[in-house]
Image (cartoon, rainbow, N blue to C red):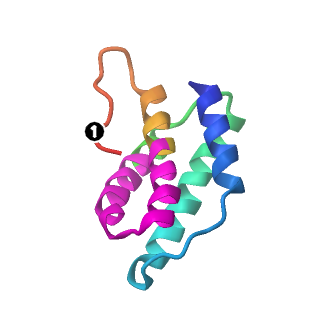
Amino acid sequence: MPDDILTLWQAHRRAELPDVPREAKGELWVLDEVVGGCVSFYLNAGGALDPPRVAILEDCRADLARLMPELEEAAAVYFGRLGLLVRLLLDVTKKPGEQGPQGL
């Protein structure tokens, strides 16, 4: 799965920032930056996340789930990919026997 995360992250970094609803713009861009920071940390730490970053990603997952219905096609693709990155990161950090995150 680390290769999936790296590949998806590289695609996300190459993608053009989409237009988003004005009322959600600030929150979406912050989510993009925060998740990006967690991905970078994960990749630079040899595939590990500390508990505070896991908690941050859980919050980001909830925020993305709330905001996604407002997004049009290009933005939905962009932030859907971001949500997939969140899910993959949370999946690799769960302990054996734990259930993975629901939703995004």
User: Mostly what secondary structure, the magenta segment?
Assistant: helix
Q: Residue at x 51, y 51 (%)?
A: 82
Left or right position of 89 against 11? left
Q: Residue at x 43, y 39 (%)?
A: 87
Outermost residue, bottom side:
22
What amino acid does circle 1 point to?
Answer: Gln
Q: Residues within 10 Å of mark 1 (few under 14, many from 20)?
A: few
Image coords of residue 23 (percent x, y): 39, 83
Tag 1 secondary structure: loop
Left or right position of 4 against 82? right
* Quarter of the rendering containing residue 64: bottom left
Image coords of residue 7 (percent x, y): 66, 36
Q: Relative to residue 9, is residue 24 depicted above or below?
A: below
The magenta region covers 56-84
* Quarter of the rendering containing residue 98: top left
Image coords of residue 83 (percent x, y): 44, 49
Q: Relative to residue 95, is residue 22 depicted above or below?
A: below
Image coords of residue 70 (percent x, y): 33, 70
Which residue is the site of mark 1?
102
Residue 92 within the segment the image draws in magenta: no
